[in-house]
Amino acid sequence: KNEVEQSPQNLTAQEGEFITINCSYSVGISALHWLQQHPGGGIVSLFMLSSGKKKHGRLIATINIQEKHSSLHITASHPRDSAVYICAVRSPDKLIFGTGTRLQVFP
Amino acid sequence: GAVVSQHPSWVICKSGTSVKIECRSLDFQATTMFWYRQFPKQSLMLMATSNEGSKATYEQGVEKDKFLINHASLTLSTLTVTSAHPEDSSFYICSAREGAREQYFGPGTRLTVT
């Protein structure tokens, strides 16, 4: 079993839909990252969380340390949100990556 | 957020030659830099971790004589793929962090060895 599990693996949505991507982990962590990777490869760091909730524009990330679970929400999704979203946990000093969630948003 | 750059963004080289990839932190001091490799549709695989002024720590299975890493300053790390072979063709991504702060990723370098 992977130390970091993401679901779903693939996700399609219509423009405007609310999207949730989930991440569960089985190790002790000091922080959790949500990353975005577009076709072409570049990785953008969306959030780093150690507790609670963070919001940036249409993106919201939450983490529940007790349940070892985090969610990434996208409100009013747009085709430009199409990308691979990766959950990564820092444990203890290295990042352990989930396998990613491939999101496609259609107009 | 902080910016990490990589150069070149893509490179094609002939088998047997060496290729150097640069990674720079543009607006912070990268006390720790990480080099990753990514195959198509797979997750990132950590190759090595380097702290400024120290020798890099390589992950199991990564040949340190083949993938030379230098982290001589707080803003620059280089990865040199020596005697490259077609199986070294991959997407190489660097990442940098200042202390225990957030880790930022470079845009990646696509290496093709012919």
Image (spheres, rainbow, N blue to C red):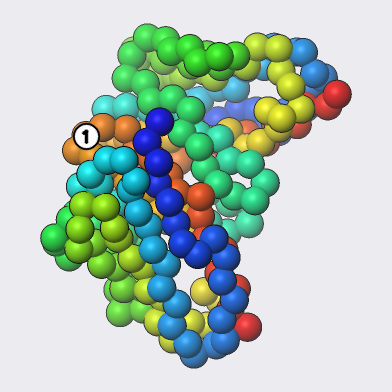
**Quarter of the image holding residue B76?**
bottom left
Q: Residue furthest front?
A: B27
Picture residue at 30% right of the left edge, 60% below the top: B77
* Residue A18 % position (x, y): 69, 12
Left or right, A81 with respect to B51, comes to: right
Inspect the image, locate mark 1, and give the three-letter code of the amino acid beneath it.
Ala
Q: Residue at x 43, y 13 (%)?
A: A54
Please identify the residue farthest to the left as the structure is shown: B53
Where does the image place residue A2, in percent across and percent down from the top left? 47, 40
Residue at 23% x, 39% y: name it. Answer: B98
Above or below for B53 versus A55: below
Q: Single out the residue that lies furthest toward the right.
A: A107
Q: Is residue B22 above or below residue A107?
A: below
Residue carrying label 1? B100
When asked about the image quadrant of residue A97, the answer is top left
Residue at left offset 59%, top offset 50%: A41
Between residue B30 and residue B26, name the one nearer to us.
Answer: B26
Whether residue A87 is situated above or below residue B19 in the rendered picture: above
State the residue in front, B2 or B64.
B2
Element under label 1? loop
